[in-house]
Amino acid sequence: MREAFGCVMTDVGRRLEQAVRSLFHGAAAAPRQEIGVSVTRNGRPAQALLLFSCAGVEQAGGKRALVCLQDVTAAKQVEAQLRQSQKLEAIGTLAGGIAHDFNNILTGVINFTALAREDCPPAHPQIREFLDEVLAGGRRAKDLVRQLMLFSRNDTGGQEPVRLQPIIRETLALLRSTLPSTASMETDIAPEAPAIHGNPSQLHQVVMNVVINAAQALEGRVGRITVRLAPQQLTAAEAAALPGLRPGPHLRLEVADTGCGMDEAVIARIYEPFFTTKEVGQGTGLGLSVVHSVVRSHGGAIAVSSSPGAGTTFGIYFPLPAAAPAGPEQGRAAIPEQ
């Protein structure tokens, strides 16, 4: 058993002993229990879930204990992924309905405010300033609604062959002036990475939201954001850990930061719209929801690696077409490699 699971079986052994003693002393033992254990897979520490069952068997030589251990880690992971997908789908349907109605209301507010501003007499400049503030707030709300609708639609939005290299560089060049001076940026963009089938504007949103999230995780402290892009051939085991993906060629976009990190409870909720760990007024909680929706609509998946105080790494996988064009990218680099 130790060799099969590659783990320290102290806790499992203790529970086995307790269950067997209960059987032999006539006490009622729990027929099935789930036991979480620390294991080593491919040389790396991980967690596994064992289904433990124990029953008494009468034989000629006396009473014996029949013990069964089954590794149900993969089945539990698939079950959790299915629950998460169903929850996000339900939230998306609700958000889409609210966003559609709210968009109609905002259209009237913005249009009538613009008309009122045009008719405002020059003798009342302060009223014009007030109306400008109303318009600015309406446009911010309009942008929020647009993100909600993008999250809820889960559509392809008109896809075409797209190279991510220029999109990444243009996005980083746009964001560089808005990032705090304490945040350093490193890039490792493979020029030969092939094109994927996608929507350029939606992919721009993915890169922008993930990098902004990484910058906010630094919390104003000195830190580093690393952006990498490279093709990767997913094995069957690697694809099984990423919901919806199959083994084969993919393009991997990685955004890593050295920020505050997240615990398991936060990671489980990061794609929920309006969920945020930031203070009131410092975030809408929609950025990663939009990222998840867009990546899913492109047939991709996201892997997150994080722990409190140790930073976060987002690995975003996009499937490559069967005959993806390769070769050097076209277009200039917006920022130099570091």
Image (cartoon, helix red, strand yellow):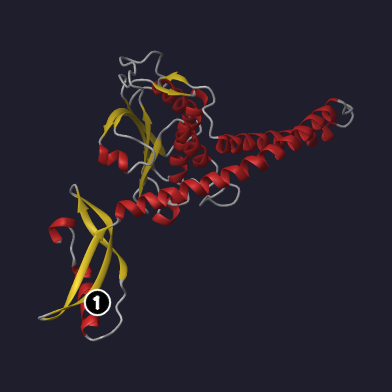
Taking depth in this image into account, of 174 and 207 the one nearest to the observer is 207
SS for dot 1: helix
Taking depth in this image into account, of 304 and 301 the one nearest to the observer is 301
Q: Is residue 201 left or right of residue 334?
A: right
Q: Is residue 288 left or right of residue 125?
A: left
Q: Residue at x 39, y 46 (%)?
A: 259
Residue 116 percent coordinates (x, y): 85, 30
* Crowd band around label 1 with a 10 angstrom C-alpha radius: few (<14), some (14–19), many (20+): many
Looking at the rendering, in which quadrant would you find the C terminus? top left
Amino acid at the residue labelled 1: Ala
Residue 2 percent coordinates (x, y): 14, 61
Q: Residue at x 23, y 78 (%)?
A: 18
Placement of 57 over or under 84, stated as above or below:
below
The mark tally for this picture is: 1
Rendered image quadrant of residue 210: top left
Disc 1: which residue: 19
Is residue 62 shown to the viewer in this render?
A: yes
